[in-house]
Image (cartoon, rainbow, N blue to C red):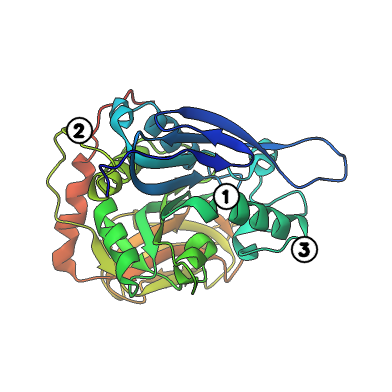
Amino acid sequence: MSDLKNTPLKISNVTIQPGERITLALPTPEIYTFAPMYIPIHIIHGKRTGPTLLVCGTLHGDEINGVAISQKLLNLRLLKSLKGTLIVIPAINVYGMMTLSRNLPDRRDLEGNFPGSKTGSFASRLAYLLREEIFSHITHCIDLHTGESNIVKFPQVKTSLENEENRSLAKAFNAPVMLDVPPEQGLLWLSKQDERPIPTIIYEVGEGLRLDAQGIKIGVNGVVRVMKTLNMIKDTAKQKKTHGSIPLEKAHMVRASFSGLSELFAKVGSFVSKGDKVAKITDPFGTEQRGEVLAPCSGVVIAKNNLPILNEGEPILQIAEMKQTSIDKIQSWTDEGKEGVKFEPF
Ligand SMILES: [Zn+2]
């Protein structure tokens, strides 16, 4: 199948010939200032048939790592012999990227608006537009995210792991850990469509409004591994041998039990045992210690809040349950970035 000659592809009234690489500007639904807004979309249509993989970033406008992963990916020479089609959208939420905000012009979060509707809100119309113009063409999807502003995420793939095809895509991506989440989250709805489920994973790393060089490297290598597994490319670069992505089934949000100034003792990617002191909270206007925060379970820290001034109940850490014996496997990832595909670092 994958050695057959490809046929022309029509997206948004543009016809792309086999072997052609184009950048398309997809107009968004209209906003009240009538200022035109476009989503830049790169399409590399291989000479030979194969899967159609969508790699998209910055669905949330303040999450920039997906833009950087897309940029590095688009510069790879190995795409020259691509089988199938690669569609790369560095930033879905162009408006949010301009305003450094998570949401769309109507203040809605696109993530909660799929599959969308033709006559709904701006967010719903944008979701519908993407469904009609882009998702209708794809066979696989990698959705690139970053932590929110002030929140740092350990490199992780999120998907519904009970879905066999999602799981094999997550395994192929090979991030340090993979987290089981309901298929309701964001673009994961693609994998639960009855008529044509599309295997989908979310890769999340780093902090909003910041670039994470190591996480970008893991991201680019992850996409390359997926394309290799799908027989879209032949990658001769030496990939670092890893222990494989560790599946994590249950994550706990650790919240501030008191308002005040928090001092964190646990690092992202480190192991904590149940009952360990992970933070202390003090009075920001005095010297009094207000309390300690203890780990509710043993596991690996997969997210942390970098903002040290907190109201009670706000998240401090996220810990995913894991056995201590797995931490060496996770920490071996600190060497990731020395091997794999080659590109200029930031
Ligand atoms: Zn996000």
Regarding mark 1 in the picture, which secondary structure is present there? loop
Q: Which mark is residue 59?
A: 1
Estimate the x, y position of residue 145 in percent, counting from the top left: 48, 50
What residue type is disc 1 on? Leu
Secondary structure found at label 3 = loop
Which residue is the site of mark 3? Answer: 120
Q: Let me know if residue 147 appears in the view.
A: no
Check the picture and name the quadrant holding the C terminus. top left
Numbered label attached to residue 338: 2
Q: Quadrant of residue 344?
A: top left
Whichever of labels 3 and 2 marks the residue nearer the N terminus, that label is 3
Q: Position of residue 196 (x, y in %)?
A: 46, 67
Q: Which mark's residue is nearer the viewer, 3 or 1?
A: 3
Between 342 and 169, the one lying in front of the other is 169
Along the horizontal axis of the image, is 51 left or right of 62? left
Residue 83 quadrant: top left
For residue 85, above or below residue 292: above
Q: Amino acid at mark 2?
A: Lys
**Residue 299: percent from left, percent from top:** 28, 69
Is residue 235 or residue 33 the one in the foreground? 235
Which amino acid, mark 3? Gly
